[in-house]
Image: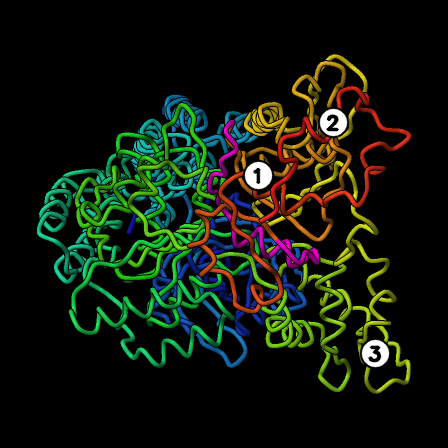
Amino acid sequence: MFNITKLKKPMNDSEQKISLPLLPLRDVVVFPHMVGPLFVGRSKSVNALSNAMNLDKRILLATQKNAGVDSPGEKDIYGVGTIGTVLQLLRLPDGTVKALVEGKKRARLIRFTDKEKYILGEVEPILEPEVTDAQTEAVNRTVVGMFEEYAKINKNISKDLITNISAISDVSQLADTVAAHFNFKIQDKQQLLETVAPMERMTLLFRFMQAEIEIYKTEQRIKGRVKKQMEKTQRDYYLNEQMRAIQKEMGAQDDHKSELDELQVRIKRKRMSKEAAAKVRQEFKKLKLMAPMSAEGTVVRNYIEWLIGLPWFERSKLQTDIDKAEAILEEDHYGLEKPKERILEYLAVQKLVKKIRGPILCFVGPPGVGKTSLAKSVARATGRELVRLSLGGVRDEAEIRGHRRTYIGAMPGKIIQSLKKAKVNNPVFCLDEVDKMSVDFRGDPSAALLEVLDPEQNFAFNDHYLDVDYDLSNILFITTANNLHGIPLPLQDRMEIIRLPGYTEYDKLQIAKGFLVPKQTEANGLTEENIQFTQNAIQRIIRRYTREAGVRNLEREIASICRKVAREVAKGDGKTCHKIIVQSIQKYLGVPRFRYGQLEEKDEIGMATGMAWTQVGGELLAIETVIMPGKGKLTVTGKLGEVMQESAHAAMSYVRSRAGRVGLNKHFYKKVDIHVHIPEGATPKDGPSAGITMATSIVSALIKRPVRRSLAMTGEITLRGRILPIGGLKEKILAAHRGGISEVIIPDENSKDLKEIPAKILKQIEVITASHMDDVLSRAILLPTDEALLRQEDEIVPPELIPKQEEAAKPLRIN
């Protein structure tokens, strides 16, 4: 095969042909002068190594043409290999063998003998021709220089290896050593091994080295270009970009074409509005022209995903069976007649009309009365999905309408996001705590809700991110709030407001028996056999351990008792059933927290009982007045707001203007100071409805006549003594009922509101209407039994200021 003109040394017959064990190699070529490990697993290969170790340690190392052949024949092995020496043999736990071999010289395979245990090859060593020193020096410098260039761009080449290669003077050894450290193809390495003449081998090596260095430089250039194109947030996509850049360098097709085809199929199948469909097609055309992993391409892709992910025409099948819906509402909630009636009316109209815009309801009431849970029941009764969005603390308009796509990380608003999760366009959408939104420099979210909750506009709601119209008119919107003060008037005007008042004591009792006790019994791992509540025990919890409009604290107290009983049951106290009676309540819940039905022991002078409305329901308000010697100063305390302080001054002005009518000298105020105080000074109080109560307390203190302790009152007073209507009447009367009051005085114009009060409450409380303050005084202040009541030993009003009987003009009028 080779034209060898001059050999390094003469060959004898013993060197011409040798029989050696053959080790077929996979994906590796061993060169002379090369030392390296080989991992051997095939049994014949292991036996060949063992046989070599037992003889002279020599073995023929020949590479397979196809690495996938497990039992190679003569045609599967290259004809030129390397005679090597086995330096070390190590058997590994998995049955394989690790062999350290050293290549010695080239050899040609003459004959292939496949023995039973291993392969035996008859080989002929190949001698190399000599080269001149001048040729050696020039070629060595060229190859070493190129290897040093390769080492500069390949950081895996060590400096020690460069030094060792630079010290090699033999051309053949240098060529073999350099070839062993390059990642040439197996065919290229085998060609170098078969090239015997050192100068020809060097020329071939030089060509392979140039090609390999150029490939490595191209790879580095590709990596550098990819890194420049990427931003910090895109580092996770580095490998994908690298593959894409390599494909681009090789002229391969874009591997993202299949993804675009899949997206196009989804766009064609999706049913959307005409505007949205046109927008998607336009954006998809832009996407096909963009780099798939570019920032702009990602934005467009996300936008298309949002548009095709929305439920444009998908909707829930509505439940139109009114009787079934009514049964569901009654099953979930006790009372709440108005909202239940409104929902059933909507279902009836829906059944007749077929197409009706969803109503926009606003449930207003104190915490714990079931506003949010009622929205869940409405969804179940109407067969719709429920979407809940809490607006408490929301202060950014973009939370409702979304961000424009020009911003990084832009997304649609919460309305569109929630609809995508619901997967239907006609859910029950509960906007919770609509009165708790805030306003700052980012906008007013309540203003953004004006379009959402307007039936005349929400059929074309335009989210800033989508920038196409979306129909919200099929949604049944339900908003909840604790009071209307935090809701702007334009937003109130767009909603149908339904008030959910506080529960009566009877309502709470029924809710506890029918729902709360079974729920907490099951939640705490108990059964009816372990615990039973008597009706009187539940009533004691309601009266003495809770004071609220709803039932949340009542549920907590019942849960507390259930936990304590569960602990006793778990310990195995021997009781089969724990019966909760009135006497055992204090054992589980401690000392009672509130007074109930405990009126004052006697009628007090200067103390009147008013009624107030709070976010948690109604409360009784005790107002005290004392008279002291002074110069006519009026002091009002109890952390009162401006409106309430003005009411106190209006009450005082009325008393002064009617001094003769109530039995006082018209100059009574010149020598006394009046102090009006409302207890619980840490609690802020405001509003005009305590006007008649403060006037009654002042008159009682001045004329030394007590106020009836079983009577409470509410109403705004004018300077002429007229009584104006007030709000929250139902909550106030419920509070009076809880406090054991038997009579209440209300403004005459509030008579119409008595229809909202349960008949059971009105049977237990006498409601008196009044249009003038004189009527209140005649009813609230007790008449004197004798003259001594007007002249007590410790009276503060000077005797000379109290008019004689003939001077007093009709002291009090009794109707």
Q: Quadrant of residue 271?
A: bottom left
343 vs 146: above or below: below
Q: Which label sits on residue 326?
A: none
Tell which residue pokes out farthest to the front in this image.
Answer: 806
Please name which of the two marks, 1 or 2, marks the residue nearer to the observer.
Answer: 2
Q: Which label sits on residue 804?
A: 2
> Type of residue at label 2?
Lys
Left or right relative to 369: residue 631: right
Q: Which residue does the image show at 45% across and 28% down from the upper left?
A: 151
Please name which of the two marks, 3 or 2, marks the residue nearer to the observer.
Answer: 2
According to the image, label 3 marks what residue?
569
Q: Position of residue 645 (x, y in %)?
A: 60, 25
Please name which of the two marks, 3 or 1, marks the residue nearer to the observer.
Answer: 1
Mark 3 and mark 1 lie on one chain; the one further toward the N terminus is: 3
- Please tell me whether mark 1 sits on a helix, a strand or a loop: helix
Observer able to see residue 107: no
Q: How is the image coloured?
A: rainbow
Membership of 739 in magenta stretch:
yes
Q: Which residue does the image show at 71% across and 84% down from the upper left?
A: 528
Marks 3/2: CA–CA distance: 75 Å
Magenta extent: 719-743
According to the image, label 1 marks what residue?
774
- Please tell me whether mark 3 sits on a helix, a strand or a loop: helix
Mark 1 and mark 2 lie on one chain; the one further toward the N terminus is: 1
> Type of residue at label 3?
Val
> Type of residue at label 1?
Asp
Evaluate if marks 1 and 2 touch, with contact meaning CB atoms under 8 Å apart: no
